[in-house]
């Protein structure tokens, strides 16, 4: 079976009531874009009611208010719908360990499961964009001159900007190492390689591609 390409994925972002579902925090917004061959072809965005009031800090941080959430569907309803959007797809998120925790927790509450693989664009950026001052999404958008899709810390805008960051990194690899085809699994493996060995890893991919 042909490996799934890195430029055909779902890029997602959550806004939440706090840092961890293990401490009772819930999702309040999901934003995602579907990339097909490096082009955004579909979007998904929903606010969701966590079942309790969110803090003033979260209201200020996200711009999402309790007034906005009170008439929204419950998390379980939104996540049941979202499970169809990501079915059969690999996913990307910036600081993916955070988003994956909430994805797994909310899907479990909705009696849904996700079986694809996940890659972190922040970890990949540490290897590809080693000249960046740091690897926060807002910093990388500025550093790489990526157009701002909306307000930072709103899920769909963050997902779109992460998608453009992801494609920019793929293009940088393609140009520097002359790799026309890059699989999702290759970038996932690269995100775990020691930064010092980034060049060695990508050179080995290019050498292997030339020998085919």
Image (cartoon, rainbow, N blue to C red):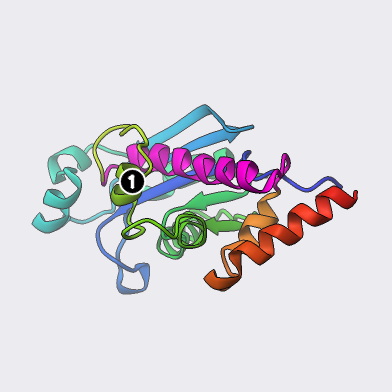
**Magenta segment: does it hold 29?**
no
Describe residue 109's horizontal placement relative to residue 4 as left or right: left
Magenta highlight: main SS = helix
Write down the quadrant of residue 58 in the picture.
bottom left
Provide residue 114's location: percent of width, then percent of height. 60, 55
Q: Is residue 115 in view from this perspective?
A: no
Residue at horizontal 70%, vertical 43%? 178
In the image, 202 versus 67, the foreground residue is: 202
What residue do we see at 16% from left, 43% from top?
Answer: 63
> Closer to the camera, 170 or 76?
170
Q: Residue at x 51, y 58 (%)?
A: 124
Tell me, yes or no, whether the highlighted magenta stretch contains residue 173.
Answer: yes
Stretch in magenta: 153-182
Residue 35 visible? The answer is: yes
Q: Which residue is mark 1?
A: 143
Corner quadrant of residue 46: top left
Q: Is residue 60 left or right of residue 3?
A: left
Q: Position of residue 43 (x, y in %)?
A: 46, 30
* Nearer to us in this view, 166 or 99: 166
Secondary structure beneath dot 1 equals: helix
The x, y position of residue 91, in whole percent, is 56, 49
Q: Nearer the viewer, residue 163 or 89?
A: 163
Give the class, few, some or many, for how many residues have Cα within 10 Å of label 1's Cα (few <14, many ≥20): some
* Outermost residue, right side: 212
Q: Residue furthest top?
A: 41
In the rendered image, the vertical position of residue 20 relative to residue 168, given as above or below? below
Where's residue 108, x and y in %? 51, 60
């Amino acid at each position: 079976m042909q490996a799934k390409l890195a430029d055909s994925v779902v890029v997602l972002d959550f806004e939440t009531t706090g840092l961890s579902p293990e401490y009772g925090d819930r999702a309040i917004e999901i934003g995602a874009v579907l990339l097909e061959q490096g082009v955004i072809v579909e979007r998904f965005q929903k606010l969701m009611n966590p079942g309790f009031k969110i803090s003033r800090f979260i209201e200020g941080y996200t711009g999402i208010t309790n007034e906005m959430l009170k008439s929204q569907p419950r998390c379980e309803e939104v996540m049941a719908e979202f499970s169809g959007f990501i079915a059969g797809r690999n996913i990307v998120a910036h600081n993916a360990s955070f988003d994956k925790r909430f994805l797994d927790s909310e899907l479990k509450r909705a009696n849904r499961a996700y079986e694809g693989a996940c890659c972190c664009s922040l970890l990949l950026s540490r290897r590809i964009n080693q000249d960046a001052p740091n690897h926060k999404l807002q910093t990388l958008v500025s550093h790489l001159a990526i157009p701002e899709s909306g307000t930072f810390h709103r899920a769909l805008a963050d997902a779109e900007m992460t998608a453009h960051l992801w494609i920019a990194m793929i293009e940088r690899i393609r140009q520097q190492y002359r790799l026309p085809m890059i699989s999702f699994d290759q970038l996932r493996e690269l995100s775990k390689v020691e930064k010092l060995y980034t060049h060695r890893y990508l050179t080995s991919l290019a050498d292997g591609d030339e020998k085919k």
